[in-house]
Amino acid sequence: MVTKNQENFEDLLQDYFAKLPKVGETIKGKVISVSNGAVRIDVNGLLIGIIRSRELFAESSEYSNIQVGTEVEATVIEQENETGEMELSFRIAGYQRVWDNMAQHVVDGVAIDAKIIHANKGGLMVQLDALTGFMPVSQLAPEHYPRVQGGDKNRILEHLQQLVGISLKVKVLDANQKEEKLILSEKAVWEDDQKAVLESYKIGDLVSGEVSALTSFGAFMKFGEGLEGLIHISEIVWQRIDHPKDILKVGDKVEAQIIDLNKSKIYLSMKRLVDDPWKKVKDMYKVGQIVSGEVHKIEPFGLMVKLDNHIHGLAHISELSNKQISNVTELRTIFTIGESKDFEIINIEPAEHRLGLRLAGVKPKREEKKEDKPVSAKAAPDKTVSDEVVSDKKEEKVEEVVEEKVEKTEEKSA
């Protein structure tokens, strides 16, 4: 015969098991002890839960210094162990919590501390709380960006390896838990700082600073309160140069003008602080004049010739000999960089910063054609000198476009 007390006990037992959290559920409770590498918490006043070993999730900042009395979340991994305690895990619940925090950081855009733990040729592996994120090279701030000539990946890696072990302020750009993808950016933090300081500057302002780096596409200049701008190679001096190092070196004190402010990017010009010498070129040089010039560059299409410190001219390969010069190798056997030669000026175009030259003594192409080919009634007329100049201009224009594309490509890769 079942007594009333037995019925009440069975009801209480059923109620107890009904309230008992199931495996996989997340529960909340207060920490009642932290000792012997284990944390014990009160589970709804029903029993004691224990978290130990790797389930402590100590690598997460949120779980690394838990104190008695702290309310925590944990996941049930076993309802009752051999000692009657519930086995719990901070790791399962904590891992989800960390990802939730990262997703919130994307929304909030806050700067947080992260430690660099590894480097590869594409970027840096970064420890952020209990997760490992990736920061591409492109997301480094200018201070840490590897400005390597020619984009040599081995040298880039050497530079990045020097950053391992340091902590940086970063922003979370992407937090995709499903794909376990966490993308970070130091550059985004730097850009915010730049924007705040840039409010005191405008296009046209003159600034003084120091050359901080040289690349094939230009020079970087530091100025003001931690600002850095780019002086493109075309904005250093009025004449064409091979590399900024021909004019500048790191550490040089220079002045420049702000010519563009694009979000956090600053573009500067040195040459605009000096009057364009090409405005007065026709006062110094005339078509037909014989001048002495120094061979400055030897290119596949001809010679770049330095007439003075500001004016450089082009002697097209077709204007350097009465015989055909077939390639740049042959050209280099005839001419040497740095030597002086006499040239005839054949055209001047100040607006285009162009001055055409012919080696003194070389016959104009028009005279050669008249001697070589008689004109017939049906034949097309011979090219005039102006036709030759137009042809030369086209070839020069092609070379300029190619050089411009190369410069832009190098700028992007850097």
Image (cartoon, rainbow, N blue to C red):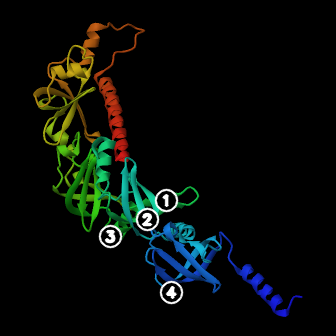
| Mark 3 or mark 4: whose residue is earlier in sequence | 4
The reply to whether residue 83 is visible in this rendering is yes
- The residue positioned 63% from the left and 87% from the top of the image is 45
Q: Are marks 1 and 2 in contact (CB under 8 Å)?
A: yes
Disc 1 from disc 4: Cα separation: 33 Å
Of badges 2 and 3, the one in the foreground is: 2
The disc at residue 182 is 1
Residue to which mark 3 is pinned? 197
3D distance between C-alphas at marks 2 and 4: 27 Å
Question: Does residue 380 sit above or below 398 in this rendering?
Answer: above
- Where is residue 167, by image quadrant? bottom left
Residue bearing the label numbered 4: 69
Q: Secondary structure at mark 4?
A: loop
Q: Which mark is residue 214?
A: none
Label 1 to label 2: alpha-carbon separation: 9 Å
Is residue 62 visible in this depiction of the protein? no
Q: Are marks 2 and 4 in contact (CB under 8 Å)?
A: no
**Quadrant of the image occupied by residue 348:** top left
- Residue 71 at x, y = what percent? 54, 83
Earlier sequence position, callout 2 versus callout 3: 2
Numbered tag placed on residue 128 in the rendering: 2
> How many residues crowd mark 2 within 10 Å: few (<14), some (14–19), many (20+)?
many
Q: Secondary structure at mark 1?
A: strand
Question: Residue at image x 38%, y 7%?
Answer: 376
Mark 4 or mark 2, which is nearer the start of the sequence?
Answer: 4
Closer mark to the observer between disc 3 and disc 4: 4
